[in-house]
Amino acid sequence: MEIDRDRIDDAILALLYLTLDRDGRAWKGFEWDAMKRLHEKGFIGDPVNKARSVWLTPNGIAQSEKLFHEMLCRSA
């Protein structure tokens, strides 16, 4: 079975929305390779630092909210 890393990245980006604060930061407790890919795609700042959180770019915030609603919310 081949893993679709883009779908994993989308799921992690959606989950980052759960801990997103007003300053655009979210807890970064996810697999390092996926966080690196999200950084390379321009959705998050560089995750390699001592902080326990990572900042999302404006595009990352918009995409994380969109994916959160698409993947994790029930429709009314």
Image: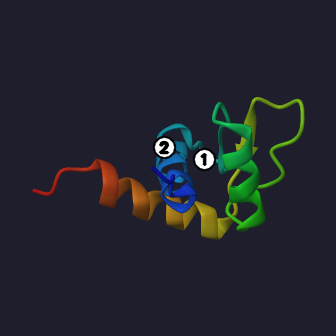
Q: Which residue is mark 1?
A: 22
Q: Amino acid at mark 2?
A: Leu
- Residue at 45 percent across and 49 percent down: it is 1
Tell me the quarter of the image containing the C terminus: bottom left
Q: Residue furthest front?
A: 1
Question: Where in the figure is residue 13, as x and y percent of width and height?
Answer: 54, 52
Looking at this view, is 76 or 41 the one in front? 41
Q: Residues within 10 Å of mark 2 (few under 14, many from 20)?
A: many
Question: Where in the figure is residue 65, as x and y percent of width and height?
Answer: 45, 58
Q: Residues within 10 Å of mark 1 (few under 14, many from 20)?
A: few
Q: CA distance from mark 1 to mark 2?
A: 16 Å
**Residue 15: image tag:** 2
Question: Would residue 29 appear left or right of 2 to someone viewing this image?
Answer: right
Question: Where in the figure is residue 49, as x and y percent of width and height?
Answer: 89, 37
Secondary element type, mark 1: loop
Closer to us: mark 1 or mark 2? 2
Residue 50 in the image: above or below residue 56: above
Residue 14 in the image: above or below residue 18: below
**First of labels 1, 2 by sequence position:** 2
Secondary element type, mark 2: helix
Quadrant of the rendered image containing residue 42: bottom right
- Residue at 83 percent across and 31 percent down: it is 51
Q: Amino acid at mark 1?
A: Arg
Residue 51 in the image: above or below residue 63: above
- Residue at 67 percent across and 48 percent down: it is 34
Identify the coloring. rainbow
